Image: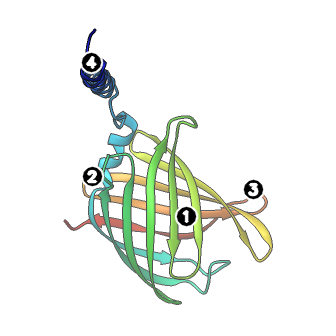
Amino acid sequence: MEDVGMKRPSMIIVFLTLLFAFTAAGRAQMQMPKPGPEHKKLDYFVGTWATDGDMKPGPMGPGGKFTGTSHDEWMDGGFFMVIHSNMKMPMGTGTGLAVMGYNADQKKYTYHEFNSMGEAEAATGTVDGDTWAWTDENMMNGNVVHGRYTMKILSPTSYTFKYEVSQDGNWITVMDGKTTKTK
């Protein structure tokens, strides 16, 4: 008669060894997703940037000059860019945190910002050559306001921008300016 007590641990060891081998092989075949070429276009924004602009009098305030700085860096994985910003405007100073990425299902870039003025902004964008075009929809004084933010790349270290709003299809420029990479 064979010793069943000795065979049982041996079979358990064989089973666990096979289980580990199959699990390890399965993990080796599963690869982490990698950013696509659309994500790589966001590389342009990596670095520290300085902005000088002009706010027009209107729905966003009294108008005047504004300045800002931002530090843009990739989040681990390379799918999302994290942007920390500081700004000085005619209404005061503020800070912001934004996340920019790409939605492959919508084939659009995404932008989500939260700032110290209590605003939460969301926009989607496209890029065509040297022009980035972002659109958003917000509530202002109880009304839906459509916005479009256009960036024209001038060089690897600078771009101009314009932000326009509309309630009825007539676009009004509310701010424009230039942003330059400092680091």
Sequence order check: which comes first, mark 1 or mark 3? Answer: 1
How many other residues sit within 10 Å of disc 1, few (<14), some (14-19) or many (≥20)? many
* Residue at image mark 3: 169
Sequence order check: which comes first, mark 4 or mark 2? Answer: 4
Is the Cβ of the residue at disc 1 closer than 8 Å to that at disc 2? no
Vertical side of 12 occupied by 162: above or below: below
How far apart in space, not on screen, are marks 3 and 4 (Cα)?
81 Å
How far apart in space, not on screen, are marks 4 and 2 (Cα)?
73 Å
Along the line of sight, which residue is nearer the eye, 49 or 165? 49
How far apart in space, not on screen, are marks 1 and 2 (Cα)?
20 Å
Report helix, strand or loop for mark 2: strand
| Residue 84 position in % (x across, y down) | 37, 70
> Closer to us: mark 4 or mark 2?
4
How many other residues sit within 10 Å of disc 2, few (<14), some (14-19) or many (≥20)? few
* Residue at image mark 1: 163
Q: Quadrant of the N terminus?
A: top left
| Residue 18 position in % (x across, y down) | 28, 20
Is the Cβ of the residue at disc 2 closer than 8 Å to that at disc 3? no
How many other residues sit within 10 Å of disc 3, few (<14), some (14-19) or many (≥20)? few
Specify whether 172 is left or right of 72: right
